[in-house]
Structure formats: C-alpha cells, structure tokens
Amino acid sequence: MEAPLPGSSEGTPRCTPLHDLHVALGAKLVPFAGWELPVQYEGILAEHRWTRDSASLFDVSHMGQVEVSGDDALVGLESLIPASLQSLAPGRTRYAVVTNDDGGIVDDLLLTRRDDDVFLVINAARIDADLTWFRARLPALTFSHREERALLALQGPKAADALSHLTPAALELAPFAYGEFEFLGVPCTFSRSGYTGEDGFEIGCDGAAAVSVAEALLARPEVRPAGLGARDSLRLEAGLCLYGSDINVDTSPVEAGLTWTFGARRQGALAVPGGARIERELANGPARRRAGFLPEGRGVVRSGAVVRDASGHEIGEVTSGTFSPSLGVPIAMGYVATQYSEPGTVLQVELRGRKVPAMVTPLPFVPTRRHQKRPT
C-alpha cells in the first residue's frame, strides 16, 4: 500500500478531519497527493521505535474508502483482480492488486466483503484513476467514494491493550477480519490488518467524530501520534510495497513477489487484464524480481540508485531505501535480474557516486508480529 513521504502537489492541499489536532500536537505537515499530512511529530526515529514497542496512531484519512454495490459485485471485481474473491467470507479482508492490460499493477488495495456490499481501501494518489478504471469496466456496479469518512490506523504490540479499555469487542477480530462496533458511542468500522508488520487496527468513522475518537486513543498511555515518515520506515522493514515506488503500472505481480495474493484457485485461471503475461511469468519466471538489500556501511541508498553485479554491469535499481531503526543498519529494496535475486548474492549499489557492496537478503527485514488468533 501507500505510505507518503514529503513531496509536493499542485494547488491547495486538502486537510483531513484531524488537521487542527495535528497542528495542536506540533506535527510537521507536508503536501502529498493533494493532501496536507503529518510526516512526523517528535521525530521519525522515536515514532518508529514507539510503534515497535507500544502503539502509535496514524491518520490515514487521505486513503480512498469506496463502497461497491450491485449484483455479483465479487464476480465483477474478480474479473479485474487476480485474487479468489468469491470465496471470501463476509467480514473478511484481503490484500490484492488490480492489473492492467499489460499485466502491470493499477493499484494495490484492501478488499472487505461485508453483508450487503464490498468495501475497498485504495491509495490516495490512485483514487481518480482507480474509480475511472473500475467504472468503465464494471458499469453495472456502483462505486461510492466515501469522502466524508476518516480513517485511523492504530499500530503496535500494545494496540489491543489500548482498545481493551475503549472498544473491547474489537479485540475478538482475527487478522484480516472486519467488524462494526461503537467506540465511546461513535459508530465505527474496525479491521485488523496493518502496514507496519505489527498488530494493528484500522478505525473508520464519520469525519465529524474523528477528533473525539483520536483524542480518546491518544489519552491512553500506550498510544502516541506518529507521522507517515515512521509509517514508511516501518513498512520497509516489513518488506511491504509502496505504490508508485516498489510497484506501478509497469510492474507485474510476479516480479513483485505478490502472487501469494492470487489464491490457489486463481493461479491457473487468470481471466483478468494482463493475464497472459502473468501466466507466462508464472510458468517461465520473470526477467527480474523484487529483492531486499543490506548495503555495507552506514550510508542510506535511496530510490533510483543503480544496482550492479560483482563485475560492475547494471542489473537493476533500488526502489526504496532507509535507515532501519530496528536493525541499526541501512536497508533497501528494489529489482534485479532474476539470476541475481538469490539471498546471499553480493552485488553493488551506487551511493553518492560510489559503488557500495550490498548483500541480497530475504524479506521481511524485521519479522512480522501480527496477532495470530484465527476465526473459529
């Protein structure tokens, strides 16, 4: 999914319902994808570590919340998404990708089957493109963008502890499950997925109630606010893709290592846009693969850095890089020619004009610690 970093956008940025609260809390705000968002409060390093040790609250209200209704909505969505959606039980959420006619990724998203409709959470920068794509190809379905809704992400090993004092019923949710509960009298939606590698809950509510929900969570001693800078370093440690950097309209799910999202039933029946390319790469292997890198030294290798083999030949590119607060070393992710993607392979990455040794390493860099309870 998407974890914004400082950037620029044209025009006046939109504000989430929590904008004034961010200002009061001393957030550093930056424009991204048409929104003004908090990138940090006390600092990315501190917020990253607090998330790993306790629980952090992220404002992700810029993400697109879309309700899909109509007959056989899951059948229609399955014609555009290479995932087993029809078998998804009500109240369950699935991470998936949408593919284009060339087998590239239109977007990655979270899809939830509810009792009467399907609920999507899509990347902020892709909202208009996604809605245009879906509506043109599934005209019998209705796609309603719920712009008035806020979305908060409570992440960390003590997230459940914090909620136990406020909405204990939400603790019964299994990983990638969905429910609707009252939060101190406010009707809220809850899911349990996360984008940090830790246990986490996504809490949706009407924008008018967002401040009261956020303030109640932040009043818990386990919880502090965190910006989207820490969210990015957390997701990279977890080996998760950032749309627009690690995956895009030119990247296939096979190259990106996302074929696990398909489900066994779809592996051999990919009647989706770009299905021919995907099936070909599944059968023969892709020309390149996403891989993790551990660069030597302390320098951070950024997106766009060239990756070379031991002889100096260009074989790939870094798509994300940061300093890992959990490991105390630089980490990076990107694409290399498939023959160089085996863990343990020593390559070279470019860092400020120098060639630095980097070892290919398995993903994730930091093991995930999501809640393990399964539905009965």
Image (cartoon, grey):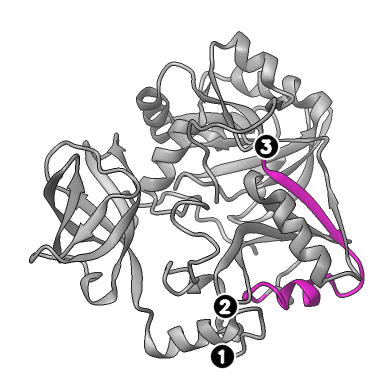
Left or right, 179 with respect to 26, comes to right
Q: Nearer the viewer, mark 3 or mark 2?
A: 3
Q: Residue at x 62, y 89 (%)?
A: 269
Cα–Cα gap, marks 2 and 1: 10 Å
Q: Is residue 328 above or below residue 293?
A: above
Q: Work out whether residue 31 or residue 192 is closer to the camera in this orientation and state it.
A: 31
| Residue indicated by mark 1 | 268
Q: Residue at x 74, y 39 (%)?
A: 204
| Residue indicated by mark 2 | 263
In the rendered structure, does residue 71 fall within the stretch colored magenta?
yes
Query: Identity of the amino acid at label 2?
Result: Gly
* Element at label 2: loop
Earlier-in-chain disc, 2 versus 1? 2
Label 2 packing within 10 angstroms: few (<14), some (14-19), many (20+): some
From the top left corner, tell me how far across and down residue 147 is, in percent: 81, 39
| Residue indicated by mark 3 | 62
Query: Residue 78, located in which quarter of the rendered image?
Result: bottom right
Q: Residue at x 69, y 61 (%)?
A: 92
Numbered range of the magenta stretch: 62-84
From the top left corner, tell me how far across and down residue 250 is, in percent: 50, 66
